[in-house]
Amino acid sequence: MLLEKISLGLIEDDPVMGESLVQRLEIEGATVEWWRSVSAARRAIEKGAPKDVIICDIRLPDGCGEDVFIGAAEATNPPPFLFMTGYADVDQAVRLIRSGAGDYLVKPFDMADFLDRVMRLIGTRTGMQQPTLGVSAAMASLETLLLRISRSSSNVLITGETGVGKEVCARYLHRNSAVAEGPFVAVNCAAIPEELLESELFGHEKGAFSGAVNRHLGYAERAKGGTLFLDEIGELSPRLQSKLLRLIDSRTFSRVGGEATIQFEGRLLCATNVDLREAVRAGRFREDLFYRINVVAVEVPPLRARPDDVIWLAEQFLSEMADQQEQSPAGLSELAARALKRHTWPGNVRELRNRIERATLLALGPWIMPGDLFPELATAGGTEWPQGGADFEPLDVARDEAERSHILRALEATGGAITPAARLLRISRTTMWEKMRRLNIDAPETERAV
Ligand SMILES: Nc1ncnc2c1ncn2[C@@H]1O[C@H](COP(=O)(O)OP(=O)(O)OP(=O)(O)O)[C@@H](O)[C@H]1O
């Protein structure tokens, strides 16, 4: 349960709304005290046991939720408030946040969003839910989703570009699941040659093939009581796809060269960075297997889609590397942080980690500088570009192009007459001529004669 051992206060006068929130929060394991007015809430907060979060309506029959917040804020270590507001009161809610309230939601809201925000506020108060995967809104809700599905035993398919952190998410799910004490067995299906993969996955009996001198337990067997994580699942051959289908359907498998039926006693998580639906359409991946592994779908967004995570992740990697090295830079310079934010991260988090690792080893000064992170940009003459860099125009070329087309537009608007066009552009006629010469814009015949 997401909110086990959490104590919440709810201030809400609407009986239907109040009832449904209390019910939902209690399903998640929270203890909820519900007050229907400002005065009831004030009395209870003054006397009662401290709450982890107070969820508060703004308009109440005997006053305003703000009054409860102001009263509570005078106590030491006040709880964060999550205000629920209608559109008309958004300004007030924003003002309350600025004065330290916590968060607000606009009604009507989605229950998942509501729970997400409650969890985040609990995290800030108790330190229990420190972000693990990232600080962006996208990763915060991914964390909540993973926590929720970690309680079930459904098969999960994690998708996302290479290096986004699919395995990190799978480990997070495992750590929070009922089988957390068991092993986490990760298999990269693309890294093992096809002829070996079957016996690596399912094991083999002694004498199953030449070289099989002993019985060998495969990953499926070693994942007993834990999680079997199959990465790059799209790479499985048709033969292994059908063996995996059997493992899922009957929860059994056999070792290569063996007759015995062995129970699969783990949880299955799969990941892919290719479009499996497309692979199904192209006949490369079994449709029935796709639906079996994809009971719950989790998509990890690319790093460029969650820029808020970049500096947070960089700081994590820096402190991890500082722990491993005797001497390491003091941190990221402001310029380096800016360069990190500008980069588009085609290699996602893996690329970020590699760049930070290299920079901590190679930085000569006390602070990491942009050139330590992107040495390819610092090479003489700038002949080496980051990936995709060759398609980028230098700024001065882009600026000239923009200027040229804007001048042409002005000339078109004035039927080619230069003086009125210069006036439209708020520049002198001389500057206009200079620019036209530099930007290779032909003057209309009539104007040339002038
Ligand atoms: N949220 C995160 N926090 C810390 N490290 C991360 C995070 N996401 C990814 N990483 C790091 O980035 C690297 C790549 O992560 P991971 O192997 O999980 O990616 P992946 O999506 O499974 O990659 P692939 O598609 O190549 O299998 C690893 O070094 C991992 O530790």
Image (cartoon, rainbow, N blue to C red):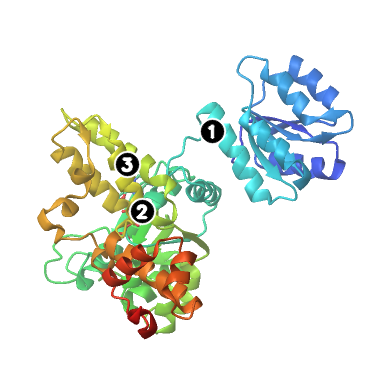
Disc 2 marks which residue? 167
Front of the two marks 2 and 3: 3
Q: Which mark is residue 337?
A: 3
Residue 186 at x, y percent in the picture: 32, 55
In what element is the residue under mark 2?
helix
Vertical position of residue 304 compared to residue 205: above or below: above
Give the mark, 3 or 1, whose residue is nearer the N terminus: 1
Res 401 quadrant in image: bottom left
Residue 231 at x, y percent in the picture: 34, 61
Kind of residue at disc 2: Glu
Vertical position of residue 75 compared to residue 145: above or below: above
The residue carrying mark 2 has its beta carbon less than 8 Å from ligand 1: yes
Disc 1 marks which residue? 123
Q: Which mark is residue 113?
A: none
Q: Residues within 10 Å of mark 1 (few under 14, many from 20)?
A: some
Q: Nearer the viewer, residue 295 or 45?
A: 45
Front of the two marks 3 and 1: 3
Q: Residue furthest front?
A: 450
Residue 146 at x, y percent in the picture: 50, 50
Q: Quadrant of the C terminus?
A: bottom left
Q: Nearer the viewer, residue 394 or 226?
A: 394
